[in-house]
Amino acid sequence: MERPVFSFFSKLIMPLFYDKKFLRGRWFKESSLGWTWCWRNLWMQKIKGINRDIPFPVSFRNEVSSAENLIFDPDDMNDFNAFGCYFQNFAAKIVIGKGSYIAPNVGLVTANHVLTDLEQHQPGKAPGPQIAL
């Protein structure tokens, strides 16, 4: 459902908080749901600091380790506004193929712990075959 005044106002305000390259695609053009996600996440993400460094709207109920290592199409912004998803991608890239849906409570992890010390992470390995979701 399109709400022209809401969308217009959101287009002016939200680029102050989120990178404009993510504020496009079907959730922002075909409906106002993308703008609703921005407003819903603004307090917890940008003010309270949960996922503060992530340049796109992501629910506080999700965790994203590294925006730089996450590759996705803005049409798939819905994957970051469900609940309970965990993207631990500080060690390697996660590529989410266009049109993918990630269910709630799914974890995508690119690193492992040192078996003798679970507080330490092992570094990512050299690039091998990529798996795109």
Image: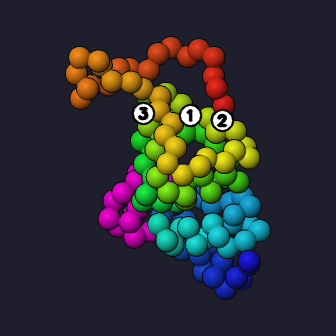
- Give the quadrant of residue 70: top right
Residue topped by disc 2:
133
Is 118 magenta? The answer is no
State the quadrant of the C terminus. top right
**Regarding mark 3 in the picture, which secondary structure is present there?**
loop
Label 3 Cα crowd, 10 Å radius (few <14 / some 14-19 / many 20+): some
* Whether residue 54 is visible: no
- Residue under circle 3? 90
Q: Residues under labels 3 and 1: Cα distance?
A: 10 Å
Amino acid at the residue labelled 1: Ile
The reply to whether the C-beta atoms of the residues labelled 1 and 2 are less than 8 Å apart is: yes
Which range of residues does the magenta coloring cover?
42-56
Answer above or below: position of 39 versus 104.
Answer: below
Label 3 sits on what residue type? Phe
Q: Where is residue 19 in the image (x, y as percent from the top left)?
A: 55, 56
Residue 71 in view: yes
Q: Which mark is residue 108?
A: none
User: Between disc 1 and disc 2, whose residue precedes?
Assistant: 1
Q: What element carries label 2?
A: loop
> Could you classify mark 1 by the number of other residues whose Cα lies within 10 Å: few (under 14), some (14-19), or many (20 or more)?
many
* Residue at point 67%, 51% (across, down): 76
From the viewer's perspective, is 108 left or right of 98? left
